[in-house]
Image (spheres, rainbow, N blue to C red):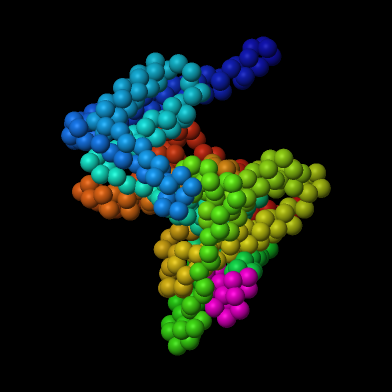
Amino acid sequence: MTATVTETVTEQPVSTRRTTEGRRATIVGFVLLGLTAVVLWVFALGAASDATATFNLSLPNDRFQGLTWAFNARALSLVVAVVLAALGAQRLRRSQLGWTNTVLGIGLLLFVVSFLGWAAAGSSFSLVGMLRSTVISAVVITLGALTGLMCERAGVVNIGIEGQLLTSAFVATVLSSAFGTVAGVTGAMLAGALLGAVLAWLAIKFQVDQIIAGVVINIFALGLTSFLASRVLSEAQDLNAPARVPSFRLPLLADIPVLGPMFFDHTFFVYGMLLLAFGLHFAFFRTRWGLRARAVGEHPKAADTLGIDVYRVRYRNVILGGLIAGFGGAFLALAQIARFEEDMTGGIGFIGLAALIFGRWMPLGCLAAGLVFGFSGALAQKVAILGTGIPSEFMLMLPYVATVIVVAGVVGHARAPAADGQPYIKG
């Protein structure tokens, strides 16, 4: 009897998992076949048989200036359609279920390449310029996602990222205008950390509902910065004129074709984003610090039993997350817009939370999700320039549709830390 029960307990989850993976493989297969139809009927037939698309793979000041890739748009679409159909058929056969996400990613990448070829048929556009814009647009989204990651991995939901970014942008603008870039970035990070400490104080000490606490911070930040902008910055214009942070090339790395201009010719904010993503991935999964933080986010009672100070870990992580948000706010004010405007974040904090879910609460996943969101914004701008007739608003909504798909489990279930959002009462 015992052996039978044990066998049932161990085999049933495997069977259930295979059923779920098989269902996802079938859905992905039909999605890929649907993309095949779009590529054939829209991109292949929509492009002239002799239309040539040209992708510029360098910028005017690059070492490889003049590097291009020219191809027949219709031929490329036909090749992509064949590959997509093969991938879709392979998924419908439900073989090698573990590769479903990889196959879907390859299919979507090929679809985007075909779309760009169709959009640029008979003309040319800077592919490297669009990829460079992708990275720039991804900075604040990724930093917002990493802020949420720091908090939620320790069990605290941070809805107040929007308010932290907005307040930090205001502080960075004023201090940078008055005292320079270093003062602006430092002040912005401290402002973000202060709001993080307020969130931690409300959520941990007083056990206020963490969603409500985050909303309060957002409303407070919006009201305070709007009031100060209308009363202070409107009269003292010199406090709303920070020097734009310049870009600088990394020797050797910036000369790599395509990847060099994309990643290694930016402001220090971009390099900071990359270092944070990779550094946090190492810290969370290769150090004792990360193990303790994850333990507090998954099972605080067990962590407390092992001698880990749950309150201290949560305070520390939420405040560190505030420092990251402050860095993101400084980027908005000093590198992207170079001035403060009321409600200049425009919901980026909430997009960062979506990127956190998209990235499955993983640092490198947050970076990848931020790049996806950034690519959508850059693609929308490029589509508007090329004049394809597709509304740019439609392109901007694609990342959110993708996020809904991820949350719905089409590409696998994204599981938050088990104790995320749950107050801990020390017994």
Q: Judge left or right: residue 182 versus residue 311.
A: left
Q: Report x, y in % for residue 69.
A: 36, 37
Which quarter of the image is occupied by the N terminus? top right
The foreground one among 359 and 240 is 240
The magenta stretch spans residue 182: yes
From the viewer's perspective, is residue 240 above or below residue 104? below
Residue that appears at 32% across and 47% down: 125
Q: Position of residue 380 (x, y in %)?
A: 33, 51
Q: What residue sits 50% from the left and 57% below the top?
A: 140
Tell me which segment is drawn in magenta: 165-184
User: Which residue occupies the foreground of this view, 6 or 124?
Assistant: 124
Residue 365 placement (x, y as % from top left)? 54, 42
Q: In front here: 286 or 183? A: 183
Viewer-nearest residue: 146 or 114: 114
Q: Mostly what secondary structure, the magenta segment?
A: helix
> Quick check: can you spot residue 77?
no
Position of residue 58 in the picture relative to residue 161 (left or right)? left
- Label total for image: 0
Q: In the rendered view, would you say 153 is above or below 74?
A: below
Is 2 situated above or below 71? above
